[in-house]
Image (cartoon, rainbow, N blue to C red):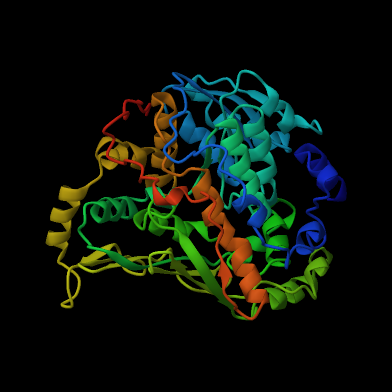
Amino acid sequence: MKNNRRDFLKLAGVSGLGLTLSGNLSAFTSKRNESIDSSAYLNAPQKFNMSGYAAPKLETVRIAFIGTGNRGSSAVLRMSKIAGVEIKVLCDLRPEKARAALKRIEASGQKPELVTGDAEAWKKVCERNDIDLVYIATPWIMHTPMAVFTMDHGKHACTEVPAATTIEECWQLVESSERNRKHCMILENCCYDFFELLTLNMARQGFFGEIVHAEGAYIHDLLAGDFSKEKYWDFWRLRMDASRKGNLYPTHGLGPVSQVMNLNRGDKMDYLVSVSSNDFMMAEHAIKLAATDEVYKQFVDKSFNGNMNTTTIRTAKGKTIMLQHDVTSPRPYSRLHLLSGTKGTAQKYPLPGKISTGHEGWISEEEFKKLEAQYQPAIVKKVGELAKQVGGHGGMDFLMDWHNIDCLRNGLPVDQDVYDAALWSSIFPLSEWSVNNRSNSIDVPDFTRGSWKTNQPVDITLSKGGNTQVKI
């Protein structure tokens, strides 16, 4: 285990940066109360506005994958179904994971190179001249270093969530994207779930009136998975839970409502407050497992993240967002998606998606189907059924990947740009600061540096593009 961990750090290329996955993520826990002053960045001019930026067209998008484990392997399979994509490289610390990902696409005709085992393997991949896009599906602390290195070497980056774990990292992503004019696309798949896309389209056409309040959540019982020796390599997610506090995984609930509320494009977050319960389960579980397995003794006496975190955000225009995070309690899965407007309401979880237009309650199933037909976004009409066949959380993962590729192939702006990656991820460290400071309020940085006032929402109607074919 020790040798594997050391090899991973070398392969990651971050050992020289003082990062470690062992123990308490010590380099990062020292930043638990880090300065979150963004004045140096906010006082500097924006290098280039990436919101609405259309990069030069790529007829064929040549992709390298870094990380082919839980999420990466599935992404490789999905990308093999999209025309105009060439999978050039599969890069992973563990050769068996890269080989397994390759086996999943052997019928596709794609013949990527496997890159494993070298201390600087991922960096060498990013430096290649035959790559257009690097798809990053690694442990969280690797996302920003890899995405920044990718963009600094002339490639677009797609990164799993969260894109960053500190405010400094958020700004590093913004600076690199602007400096290199390369997209940094956060892979927030929940923005592409079918009800979320439907209600986004309805909101943009004024169905709900003025959106006053929204709610989102990530409530998912991961207790067994966190302590599993197989699910997260070297317990990397458990180590994060044992060293950080707050909403560590904000983007699933936040991304969809941020798009509806046009954050970064007409409104911005102003400040937030965050409160966490104590941990009532993880420490106890660590003690229980350590009684029969010495591997878990390293997690005894750790100060784990609380069961439930609730974060409330106020925007510059006086609207509010409530986010919740709980990955340990024995609760039914929920990505609460609630939109409350002056003319109507939408909610998904714990019920299936529902719409209301007044105090009398939810509209009937028949009425809902009529609205669904009327407001169905063009992306769902075109690719929705194919996405369900390919899969990935019911098809939303494929819709996300297909749309990103279609934008790159047609030279269109992406709808989840670097400012979204930074803003949505910033809730992690900002909520941590608030929790550690008796739930005091903390300002949310404006990563657009004022451009939110004139930035426009990105079109989802496929008035342009939409010509990328799917191979089933």
Image quadrant where residue 236 sits: bottom right
Q: Residue furthest right?
A: 3
Q: Quadrant of the C terminus?
A: top left
Q: Visible in this render: residue 103?
A: yes
Residue 349: x %, y % from top left: 36, 67
Is 93 in front, or is 345? 345
Give the side of residue 315 with respect to residue 222, left or right.
left
Image quadrant where residue 413 sits: top left
Residue 426: x %, y % from top left: 58, 58
Is 29 in front, or is 304? 29
Q: How many marks?
A: 0
Give the side of residue 292 with respect to residue 143, left or right.
right
Is 413 in front, or is 27? 413
The vertical placement of 41 against 10, above or below, is below
Is 22 in front, or is 291? 22
Give the side of residue 61 with respect to residue 13, left or right.
left
The vertical placement of 322 against 82, above or below, is below
Residue 207: x %, y % from top left: 20, 58
Q: Visible in this render: residue 67?
A: no
Residue at the spot x=29%, y=62% of the render?
353
The vertical placement of 435 against 395, above or below, is below
Residue 263: x %, y % from top left: 42, 55
